[in-house]
Image (cartoon, helix red, strand yellow):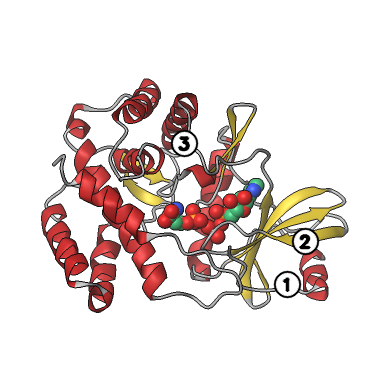
Amino acid sequence: MSVYTDVSAPALAEFLSHYDLGVPKALEGIGAGTENSNFFLQTDSGRYVLTLFERLPAAEIPYYLHVTEWLSQRGIPCPAPVHARDGTILRELCDKPAAIVHCLPGASIVQRCPSDSEVAAAGALLARMHLAGADFAERHPNPAGWFWCQHTARRLSPKLSPAERALLVEELEAQKAWPRDKVPGGVIHADLFPDNVLFQDDAISGVIDFYYAGDDAWLYDLAILANAWCSLTDGSLDKHRAATLWRAYAEIRPIERAEHGLWFPYMRAAALRFWLLRLEARHFPRPGAMTECRDPEEYRRILACRREFC
Ligand SMILES: Nc1ncnc2c1ncn2[C@@H]1O[C@H](COP(=O)(O)OP(=O)(O)O)[C@@H](O)[C@H]1O
Ligand SMILES: N[C@@H](CCOP(=O)(O)O)C(=O)O
């Protein structure tokens, strides 16, 4: 669970005085999530999500809010930011950058495997999102891309077991040759795990948590989904589900010839990235009132299995 900052009633009232959202009725900390402090905010005008940004530098946050505004205006069901009366979308609350976004309906899939139709819906939505973001003008290199992986590996190295360190060294050596900019790309979500997709009546009603978004290869984004939606408990790939994901995506954005050979390397690169992300959260934890730490072992197993393909 993650709520790193408590918001008092007077602080909330002062913050809301800049918006036309009516009177606050309830503010409820959201347990899920790892990066920010999130709250469901009920006012007499509706339901919203209040986010206090705990990790991101204030200067980078507008990019994420602009992306979601852009995509929501193009039919992607993602949380559009609410503008304050003066037009701003990012303000300060409890000395943290803070924003209010629209609350989307539906619930994410928890504690069960996604069905074929849910996997297909996620693949199709990802392709629509890539196309909708193709003309987005702000450039923002993937914040957890290859440069971040190398830097984080160096930082983590002294904390790792000899076996983990050996795996990491081998991976960095193998992956440094893989092309990352010669394939179609643009804005990627980069964290589209099942917990970031909301379903209502079997259809996707929301895509949330764009705070890892940035510019990278579109196929790499699909590879992140393949690992997150199509892995079995032992880390191996459920090939039937992965094929379903690929087909649903490719029906909307046909995969180009140059991308085909990168499907397995990108799944491996995506596995490395989330293994590192979780190791970083474990070895360099942020102080927090309620903090969920996801298991790095899950992604070490996925990485080990993807190494068998390429
Ligand atoms: N716009 C939204 N609409 C509905 N629920 C949301 C929205 N934003 C966040 N949530 C809820 O908050 C939880 C945590 O949000 P998330 O963005 O994943 O957090 P973090 O950025 O800390 O990882 C989600 O799992 C979801 O339940
Ligand atoms: N999805 C990532 C971690 C990022 O967490 P989120 O709550 O921001 O989606 C993982 O599973 O490691």
Q: In the rendered view, tell whether residue 217 sits above or below residue 175.
A: above
Rounded to the nearest whole Å, what is the CA distance between mark 1 and mark 3? 36 Å
The mark found on residue 27 in the picture is 2
Q: In the rendered view, tell whether residue 166 sits above or below residue 288.
A: above
Give yes or no for contact between labels 3 and 2 (Cβ–Cβ under 8 Å). no
Rounded to the nearest whole Å, what is the CA distance between mark 3 and mark 2? 31 Å
Mark 3 or 2, nearer chain start: 2
Amino acid type, label 3: Cys
Rounded to the nearest whole Å, what is the CA distance between mark 2 and mark 1? 9 Å
Mark 3 residue element: loop
> Which one is in front in this view, the residue at disc 1 or the one at disc 3?
3
Residue 172 drawn at (x, y percent) = 16, 60
Q: Quadrant of residue 207?
A: top right
Q: Residue at x 32, y 26 (%)?
A: 240
Q: Which quadrant would the N terminus be assigned to in this image?
A: bottom right
The mark found on residue 242 in the picture is none
Mark 2 or 1, nearer chain start: 1
> Which one is in front in this view, the residue at disc 3 or the one at disc 2?
3
Residue 44 drawn at (x, y percent) = 87, 51
Amino acid type, label 2: Leu
Give yes or no for contact between labels 1 and 3 (Cβ–Cβ under 8 Å). no
Mark 1 or 3, nearer chain start: 1
Mark 1 residue element: loop
Left or right, 305 with reference to 36? left
Which residue is labeled 1 in the image? 7
Left or right, 108 with reference to 39? left
Which residue is labeled 3 in the image? 113
